Image (tube, coloured by chain):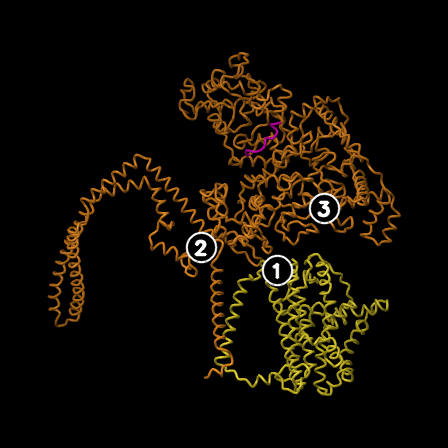
Amino acid sequence: MGQDERHYNINKLNMLFAFASIALLLAIMSLFMKDYDREWKDYQTQFRAMEVEKARVKLDKETLTLEAQDEYNELVAQLEKAQAEFDAKCALTDEIKASLKEVEDQAILVEQDYKFRKAELDALKYKFEHAEAYQEADAEKYGEEFQALSERVNELGLQLEVSKQALKAKEQEIKSCGEELKQLRRSQSKIAGQRDLLQRKLDSIDPAEMTFVNQIANLVRDLPVLDLANPNNKIEQVVLKDVTDNVNFMNVPKVERCISCHLGITNPDYENEVQPFKTHPNLEQYVGKNSPHPIEEFGCTVCHGGRARGTSFNGAVHVPSSPAQKAEWEEKYGYHQMELWEDPMIPLPLTQSQCFKCHSGETRIKGADKLNLGLSLIEKSGCYACHEIDKYKHWNKPGPDLTKLDTKISKEWAYRWINDPHSFRHNAMMPAYFNQSNNSDPVSLKRSSQEIHAMIHYLFENTQPFQQAKLPVKGNAETGEELVKSIGCYACHQIKPEADLVKTDIDNLRRRHGPNLIGLGSKTSKQWLFNWLKDPTRYHPKTSMPDMRLTDQEAADIAEFLSGDKNREFDAQPVPEIDVNILNGIVIDFLKRGLTDQGARDKLAQMKLGEKLHFAGEKLISQYGCYSCHNIKGFEGAKPIGVELTEEASKSIHKFDFGFLHIEHSKHAWFTQKLKDPRSFDHGKIKAPDEKLRMPNFEFKDEEIEAIVTALMGFVNTSTVEAKKVPRTPENLIKEKGQDLIAQFNCQGCHIMEGNGGTIASTVETWLKEYEGKTDNEAATVRDSFSPPNLHGVGKKLDPEWLFNFLHEPKQIVRPWLRVRMPTFNFNVSHLNSLIQYFQAVDGDAFPYKFDPDTKMTKEEYAAAEKLFSEDYFGCTQCHVVGGKLPSGSQDSWAPNLALARTRLQPEWLIEWLKNPSALMPGTKMPTFFDPDSYEESGPEDILDGNEDEQIRVLRNFLMSLSDDTPEPEAKAKPRPKSTTAPKKAAPAESNP
Amino acid sequence: MIETIKEVINKITNPQILFPILAVSYLFVFPMNNFFEKINRKLGIYKLWTRNGGILMMSGLFAFFCFGISDPNFRKIVSKPDNVPIVGLLFLVVFFLWLSMKQAYDNDARIAAGKPPQEAEDAKEKILVWPDLVYIEFICLILCSVLLLVWAMALQAPIEEPANPSVSPNPSKAPWYFLGLQEMLVYFDPWLAGVVFPTVIMIGLMAIPYIDNNKKGSGYYTFNDRRMAVSIFMFLWIVLWIFLISVGTFLRGPNWNFFGPFEYWDLHKLEALTNVNLSELIYMIWMKKQLPSNILLREMWGFLAVFVYFGVMPLLLAKTVLKNVFKNLGPLRYSVFVILLLFTASLPIKMLLRWVFNIKYIIAIPEFFFNI
């Protein structure tokens, strides 16, 4: 075919074809490169280099330590010597090798011969048997042959054994020569095992230490395409079978690939490295092999959120903690938010929220301080009253009962309070509904004032009678002040403005369990206070305020003192008049909901002012949800007004209305904004008054908001982590129930329980300084003796029955010198049982089976016990109260009433206690009479033949026999000298039990 | 200044404005009869199909995208991996439209000068299948592979969140090739937009060879010889197909609301829904009285309108505007043709009725799920 027949220029086409082919090649290559090039591979390469570096450093260190040891050096010298000897004597010379070879050859030849003959024999055996069986002619011939061959085989067998023996002997000879060397090598590797291990590790990972062939293999295994076999760089993952991802149609096991980049996460060597190699903090608690949350079982995203299968920075849906970090990430990793993943990582400051997923039953989760603070704030602020939260379903309404309101406060005070509670007390628990960002325009302000009037009218109209006793005696404010400071009011209340600088923490919140009492004189009357203090439940049946068992005089004193504090500024706030026009507007808005416009007007025209106020008040209370927190007549059983929060953080982000606010579109940002300014999402919206957002403002501080957001982020659907939850065993349930009660009644305001609480101690210290004339140092040392006891180990220690009665009504006073009083709480039987079960569960003590040991004593035993008890030996009465008898020692060291031991203490516990008190209560002031280190010699030799066990037993039995009406021990004891010197042994009160 | 331009564009791109503009200018760009042809010539619109016209159109389109890309909202929509092919589609459609029309106009000029069309000249040349054709096909194949590979690397597959039966994406969009149908759903009841129209479209396409008895224009590009056919096709293709796909892709945002190309897709944007049925318009708004309770009485006007449209209009058209067509095709072909034509026209008519009179349905019998 001629050139002229071609339509196109062939050269041009060829060029085009070449260009297209090269382009295709490049495209395919870049396709491979793109597929091959992954972030995690770079990290793994970096990590391997770090591993090599770390192993080298460790190896050097180990070698240096070894070389510093004489033993090792000696061994090395010996080894060298032995090696030299070995080389000289035992080295395999050609001669030896040749002779060995000869013997070997011989053996092999004989063996082969033997095997062949054996095979022939077997074949012949068959022929012979066959011939015999069928009586063939040549049977006899075969018989002879068989006989001959089997003899030959036997002979060969013997030969073979001999030659094998010879070979063995020869080998043994060569081997035995190096025996000493081997022995030395073994002992060397014993000493230098660690180093050899490191060396082996280095050999396998460090290219510099590898053989040339291995180096090549090391390179090749990571090349594109070839890396399918056994690459260095590979995705590391943990598969969690019992934790699932909900992909809407099914639950699939979680596959955690975070460790593909976070390679040093469980390795403590990487503590100071940068991300992603850094070690996880607190390995004993999280991620570590022996921690309660090992990575193999819990993975990473169960607690951190994010996309578990992601293997790139953005693919794992990291979330920055701050705008600064976001900027840093954008620069470093090309960070962008992955909007389509519904479960992004929890920002680091809020990570504790995820503890709540599995530990939701616990009231305070150990180690999760921020979460605990958040939960405490939710409890204290009463969020659960408007917003249903599963955990708090059974909790009482947080606000006071308003059904007897008229006896407590005036309408004017109520107006000012509702209008701006924080102007009365800067940290009032009541949140602010008015003067907020969506109702502070002039029109709304006018309307607000009339709304408040209407609500107050309703509240004061719907009251029930409350008989107030007259003050029987005149109170003394000064005595009242001392009482308030000493009997324990400060466990829950404060009577001073709190500096804004004070950081909110759990202790702080315990001391604010009840309202701050400043300005009480402006709020209520002396008489009301007197009646309230005498019996709080009469006014508010479900109050958590306990009965302090005050005498009339004491109650009057306290009432006098508290009512003396008045807030003049607050009292001076003007209360606007009722404006009928505005009120009509409010009433008609509500009327229109059920009536036509004209109907509403007609109805309004018929209403008197009182009716209008009542009508509007009722509707407004319902609108603002006042009844969620307060008991209000007419709203019994009404449903709370807020949205349920139990699984709030699992709600899709699209369900949060960000309005016209330009904030980050994330749940935590929304929660933060909502708590900062609950009405701000109304910004820029046009709404009728009853459509506006109504969540009130609690004026939380920033750190409080962060803590609450932490808790909120933990309120999620937990169906995917069901298997990881704290097991629902009876013990755990009992503990959780107890903790819940402790939080409700603020037991830890006074007592240390499970290592937390006892916040009242600092105020006891102040009291000691102010009223008891102690110096700072003294007060600090003895404050624990004057504070409520530490309840560590109470479950094992106290008799359940006694504890039940004591909690129900603390009549028997164990520590008569304490000014702080155990109040009479409003516990019901279920509360009491739960608490006792709780104490026992915490100590791992079985309930309710109790073993009552025999506490009878013979006369001799009694005498011996009496001696031990006396001044001459242990001198128990120096510190311990016994019935009405007070101890002889200084008040700072007084200890519980021993006359109560019989009913109060558990006999087995008493034995353990006498044996070694500080083992049961670390830091106790009870002296150790029997030294646990030399127990056999510790007791006095002259009593009961120096048998310590017996001594303790009789002393225990003796103590169990004491009672208020057993004066004998005191009478029989030697008259005590009235010395004021300190006790011989530093034996003050057991610190707190 | 730039902001003003953007706002003007946002306003203009609203289908209520853009569609009429397109529909009217279409008449002049693809003149159906001598009247429009004259105006076309007078205004020099035909120059679009010259070399300079092509450069102008392509660079205009290109300039528009260059201008828009600086706007974050525009960039976000245009660069979405889902939408990139549609951007490509716009450029390709304009280019090939120009190419074919240029050839058609060139041929028309040749024929007017008494010469055969360009294709007749080409036919004299010979191309060997092997190696010429196969070779260039092979090169094309390689280049297309390169294009696809590079595209796949440059734009990640647009994978979204795990499917959740209780959460539907907003906006929920059909695949691009169905966006025209989805757009029709705004104006018609689903049984019409989803069932009847697609069926009619397919039947119509099958019927074309039997209806078209014009022997001219076979084997070469021409406009003059097939004015009617080309312009009807262009309307269906450019205005009712490409335009509606573009609207569905770029201009329909959350809640299927309309958003200008430079507008932020605000989830909370609300549009007033004040549409009425024809019966409501006639009885309540014009006659100021209640709707009759009898369904037939109530929908009488709608039935009348539909009857006039499909029953009377063909006759009227046969006597007036389509007199020549009727003569050419004969009664049977004519009636098939005119019914198909009326179906086609019903979409823009309904759109206009919606925009001008807020008409929801011509016939609305929700009692029997029958709405037109």
Is residue A418 or residue A77 the one in the foreground?
A77
- Name the disc covering residue B165, or none: 1
Q: Secondary structure at mark 1?
A: loop
> Where's residue A139, x and y in %?
13, 69
How far apart are the two marked residues, 2 and 3, measured between alpha carbons?
51 Å
Measured along the vertical axis of the image, is residue A293 above or below residue A855? Answer: below
Residue at x-position 71% and y-position 21%: A478
Measured along the vertical axis of the image, is residue B323 above or below residue A46? Answer: below
Q: Amino acid at mark 1?
A: Pro
> Where's residue A488, x and y in %?
64, 27
Residue where numbered disc 2 is placed: A234
In screen coordinates, is A511 left or right of A928?
right
Q: Residues within 10 Å of mark 1 (few under 14, many from 20)?
A: few
Q: Amino acid at mark 3?
A: Arg
Magenta part of the chain:
A754-762
Q: According to the rendering, which colour does chain B have?
A: yellow
Mark 2 in CB contact with mark 3 (< 8 angstroms): no
